[in-house]
Image (spheres, grey):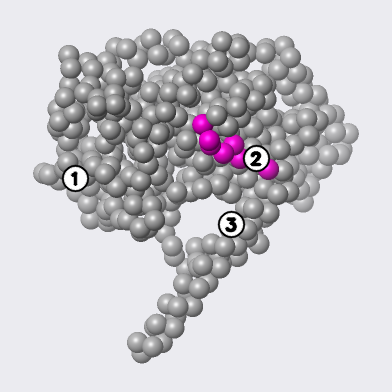
């Protein structure tokens, strides 16, 4: 069946979840929308858009075969055989609830320089509406990007992806890669246990923190199904490592991280995370000195992961059948988190005094902070502009991500994720193959006239601190002007 563009538009406005994939029209059922392993938001943000590159980057060949059951026909392309994207309703504040449209936020445009950039202001009195989004709501006419140019980037990316596949870079290095990591885990765990039983509790805490730090990288690959490439197997292993040993929910991480790959810039005024960050008195105070608090905050970054993990698990326990993996995955995560606090709590209790227990707790958690610094460097120093649905996947990833250059002997500290550009281009690649793949990505960028950003660890830190200070200075100026206007009105 062939669908004209106006028919696709009509169906979207009626509430259907329609996504374009290689000229085909996918219709996502409501049941699968809530069970999608990458979360519903990663699908809703591609309604009316060509998601071919994203779909093939995030899914295995087996998953792509299953995807065909969602195809209901082909779509009408323009005279150049390109699909002109719609703006997904969720990106203008519209969502479906109980079969009706709900306008939960109002879109605003704050920059004439970037007319396609949409920010949302949450409504406090929204309710299901008898109306819904309109044709104007779905329009992307304000985009400044050339669809032809973006389509060229997309075609070149697909050829690059095929080169990645042909060179066997999706093949998992079980012995040289993950076997070595497993040995590292055993050594760090053994060193922590030996130090603890020898009475060197601070040293034990340090080794435990290093173990958690290294576990994250393997869990990262498992969450992307980049190890065995089988959902159930990778999820089972990742629950053991992340929940039972690390005390963090791998289910939360996967859902959140898939959204991160859709939107690397993570602005609070957008819809990928559906979180409102009020600019209140506390925010004004902290933002004004954020460049001074940067490292202090990241020292305790692991606490934020706890804060985000546990509500996610509680929510999933209420409706386990709605989510991929069903009851067994979320129940196993719950058992794992309880097990974690059981064994870790016993370590704290056995320290001998509350002072030593506090030091053990703090040292073990602060030791993991280099991970948070490295991930921040890879994105916060890059563009945060949203160029709209017209932007192609490879262009968006190269524009918003950078590598952190480091000596090969120090790669283990970054877990291979210092090669963030290549990872964002091909998220399912085992980390151990990223260095080889990055050479191909650099060739691709040069051929297409795109920038492959990379800088050293020190340079990256200076860049991020400069960005944070720039925002802090702007806030000070805004506060000063607002205060002056207030006094003048009096």
Where residue 341 sits in the image (x, y, percent)? Answer: 62, 35
* Disc number for residue 136: 1
Q: Residues within 10 Å of mark 3 (few under 14, many from 20)?
A: some
Q: Residues within 10 Å of mark 1 (few under 14, many from 20)?
A: few
Q: Quadrant of the N terminus?
A: top left
Where residue 250 sits in the image (x, y, percent)? Answer: 53, 29
Is 22 inside the magenta-drawn segment? no
Residue at image x 38%, y 9%?
Answer: 65
Q: Are marks 2 and 1 in contact (CB under 8 Å)?
A: no
**Whole-number angstrom distance, CA of label 3 to CA of label 2:** 17 Å
User: In this rendering, which labeled residue sits more in front, label 3 or label 2?
Assistant: 2
Where residue 135 sits in the image (x, y, percent)? Answer: 17, 41
Question: Helix, strand, or loop for circle 3?
Answer: helix
Q: Which residues are magenta?
A: 448-455
**Residue beneath label 3, please?**
467
Quadrant in the rendering for residue 27: top left
């Amino acid at each position: 069946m062939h669908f004209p563009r106006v028919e696709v538009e009509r169906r979207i406005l009626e509430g259907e979840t329609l996504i374009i994939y290689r000229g085909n029209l996918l219709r996502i059922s409501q049941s699968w929308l809530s069970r999608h392993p990458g979360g519903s938001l990663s699908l809703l943000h591609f309604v009316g858009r060509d998601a071919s590159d994203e779909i093939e980057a995030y899914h295995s060949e087996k998953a792509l075969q299953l995807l065909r059951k969602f195809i209901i026909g082909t779509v009408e392309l323009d005279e150049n055989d390109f699909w002109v994207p719609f703006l997904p309703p969720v990106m203008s504040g519209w969502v479906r609830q109980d079969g009706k449209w709900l306008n939960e936020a109002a879109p605003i445009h704050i920059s004439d320089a970037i007319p396609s950039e949409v920010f949302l202001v949450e409504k406090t009195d929204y309710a299901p509406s008898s109306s819904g989004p309109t044709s104007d709501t779905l329009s992307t006419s304000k985009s400044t990007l050339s669809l032809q140019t973006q389509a060229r980037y997309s075609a070149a990316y697909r050829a690059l992806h095929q080169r990645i596949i042909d060179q066997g870079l999706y093949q998992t290095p079980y012995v040289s890669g993950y076997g070595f990591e497993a040995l590292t885990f055993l050594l760090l765990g053994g060193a922590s246990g030996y130090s603890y039983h020898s009475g060197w509790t601070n040293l034990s805490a340090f080794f435990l923190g290093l173990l958690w730090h290294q576990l994250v990288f393997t869990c990262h690959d498992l969450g992307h199904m980049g190890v065995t490439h089988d959902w159930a197997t990778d999820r089972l292993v990742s629950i053991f490592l992340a929940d039972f040993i690390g005390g963090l929910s791998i289910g939360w991480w996967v859902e959140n991280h898939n959204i991160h790959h859709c939107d690397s810039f993570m602005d609070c005024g957008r819809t990928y995370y559906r979180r409102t960050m009020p600019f209140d008195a506390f925010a004004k105070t902290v933002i004004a000195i954020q460049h001074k608090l940067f490292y202090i905050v990241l020292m305790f970054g692991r606490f934020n992961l706890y804060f985000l993990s546990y509500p996610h698990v509680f929510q999933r326990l209420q409706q386990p059948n709605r989510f991929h993996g069903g009851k067994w995955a979320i129940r196993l995560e719950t058992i794992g988190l309880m097990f974690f606090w059981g064994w870790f709590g016993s370590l704290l209790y056995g320290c001998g005094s509350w002072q030593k227990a506090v030091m053990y707790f703090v040292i073990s958690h602060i030791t993991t902070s280099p991970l948070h610094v490295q991930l921040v460097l890879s994105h916060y120093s890059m563009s945060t502009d949203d160029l709209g649905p017209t932007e192609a996947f490879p262009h968006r990833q190269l524009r918003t991500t950078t590598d952190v250059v480091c000596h090969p002997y120090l790669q283990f500290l970054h877990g291979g994720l210092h090669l963030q550009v290549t990872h964002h281009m091909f998220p399912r690649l085992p980390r151990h193959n990223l260095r080889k793949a990055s050479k191909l990505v650099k060739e691709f960028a040069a051929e297409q006239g795109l920038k492959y950003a990379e800088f050293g660890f020190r340079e990256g830190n200076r860049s991020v601190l400069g960005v944070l200070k720039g925002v802090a200075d702007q806030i000070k100026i805004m506060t000063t002007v607002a205060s002056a206007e207030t006094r003048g009105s009096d």
